[in-house]
Image (tube, helix red, strand yellow):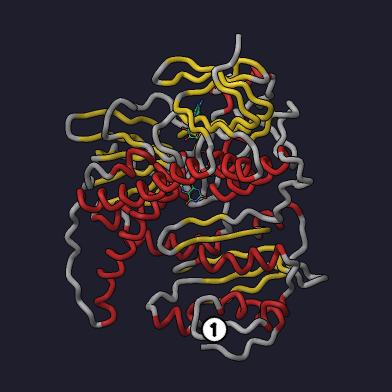
Amino acid sequence: GKADIECDTLVLGAGPGGYTAAFRAADLGQKVVLVERYATLGGVCLNVGCIPSKALLHAAKVITEAEEMSHFGVKLGKAEIDIDALRGWKEGVVKKLTGGLSGLARARKVQVVQGKGSFSSPNTLSVETPEGSKTIAFNNAIIAAGSAVAKIPGFPYDDPRLVDSTGALELRQIPKRMLVIGGGIIGLEMACVYDALGSRVTVVEFADGLIPAADRDIVKPLQKRIEKRYEGIYLKTKVTKLEAKPDGLLASFEGENAPKEQQLYDMVLMAVGRRPNGREIGADKAGVVVNERGYIPVDPQQRTNVPHIFAIGDICGDPMLAHKATNEAKVAAEVIAGHKVAFDAMTIPSVAYTDPEIAWMGLTETDAKAKGIPYEKASFPWAASGRALAMGRDDGMTKLLWDPETKRIIGAGIVGVNAGELLAETVLAMEMGADLEDLALTVHAHPTLSETPMFAAEMGLGSITDLY
Ligand code: FAD
């Protein structure tokens, strides 16, 4: 029969990938329908990911900074936490952003359809809306249905004391004792929040190091700091059993360094990764290939195996990051509009917003060694940065990797306060093909942490002179 709605471009999922694609396609003159199962736009990132976590991490930073003021001869006393007000503030930040998106959609005449969507053919999607099932016919589709939390089977998931990142961000209570399963970015960010709020935190990681994707030297300052603050950090360790007891969740461990005894926790956070939603959208009905891990493979124009269907963001591959999704989104929308473009980034930067922050881009030393890629490096210790010392936070380091022949920047790793912001210069340097001299000869304001990539470049040239 005839479709209920017809459009040029259908976008499935309204996360950072989906809303960016929908807005760009509309700006390029397309009639766009955006399908989202939840009532608010913004996907994981705005509702239960990047934004609420950063709001809470900011509060955590202020709390720990205030605690550490006594080093400077200033005593602020112990922070008093009004958990309802803190939660309310976080929710306000999220609401501003998601509400803003609805306004932007209206302004562009993007039609938002609420409901779970599933392909019924290569040119139709059926949506379970609150008013019943609707069929949308489209000429082109962009799949942006994201990812979901991965779970270890056999744990008591109906117990409210076992949470995923979404549950942890709800901030229902401040547990006395908290177990974080997974020492990746999301686990460590939430650990950082609850530690600042006063929980005794234990982190368990299966791999032999925290944040396994980053070089060890830039993880070390974080590890040193949290080893002092947290109750325990257990590497090469597995949680084998989690049992619901009246007074907590009882965890059993396996691993050389793990606690021999079972331990009782008030809250357990499961943060062992995310899996793509490729199998949840009826892709087969559209003829779209989903691989064995649940990802939808795409070419550099974000096209799936079906020429008029595109995929972007978490659902089409790693790294699962919002800025990958938004950049791929623009490519997909522009390709549909006939532009000759492709996703061609030299690197996608990664940031852990822990305290200290860990940020890296381009080649890592670990990767270079594994693949036999030649490189040279310089690491500038923040103990020699006047600004870092003036902040009482000289526990940072800025590292540059360059090509030995051309001296062009091919990688960077930064750990320290605001490392995520500092990384941007190195990403631009790499995209622009900048070499050590370009960084060293660019005048940087003094005293700033942004001088540290310049100092590292000067070290690389053997010409560092203006320390402090
Ligand atoms: P998503 O944001 O997952 O959006 C997909 C949307 O599709 C969702 O709204 C979903 O409801 C909808 N959907 C799915 N299936 C259907 C269907 N069948 N019908 C209708 N709608 C559907 N990334 C960063 O870059 N920086 C960070 O600081 C950061 N912090 C994070 C913190 C946490 C706690 C988490 C969990 C993630 C974080 N991420 C961060 C990752 C980031 O959130 C994701 O990479 C990003 O949201 C991916 O965007 P997306 O558009 O691909 O998908």
* The one of 236 and 34 positioned closer to us in this rendering: 34
Rendered location of residue 282, percent (x, y): 58, 19
The residue under the point 28% across, 78% down is 71
The residue under the point 57% across, 65% down is 423
* Horizontal side of residue 232 vs 84, given as left or right: right
Which quadrant does the N terminus fall into? Answer: top right
* Horizontal side of residue 271 vs 440, given as left or right: left
Would you say residue 199 is visible in this rendering?
Answer: yes
Residue lying farthest right?
A: 405
Label 1 sits on a secondary structure element that is loop
Rendered location of residue 37, percent (x, y): 45, 28
The residue under the point 51% across, 48% down is 208
**Residue type at tag 1:** Ala
Q: 350 above or below 319?
A: below
* Horizontal side of residue 264 vs 303, given as left or right: left
- Occupied quadrant, residue 55: bottom left
* The one of 71 and 208 positioned closer to us in this rendering: 71
Mark 1 packing: few (<14 Cα in 10 Å), some, or many (20+)? few
* The one of 367 and 174 positioned closer to us in this rendering: 174
Q: Which residue is mark 1?
A: 445
Would you say residue 257 is visible in this rendering?
Answer: no
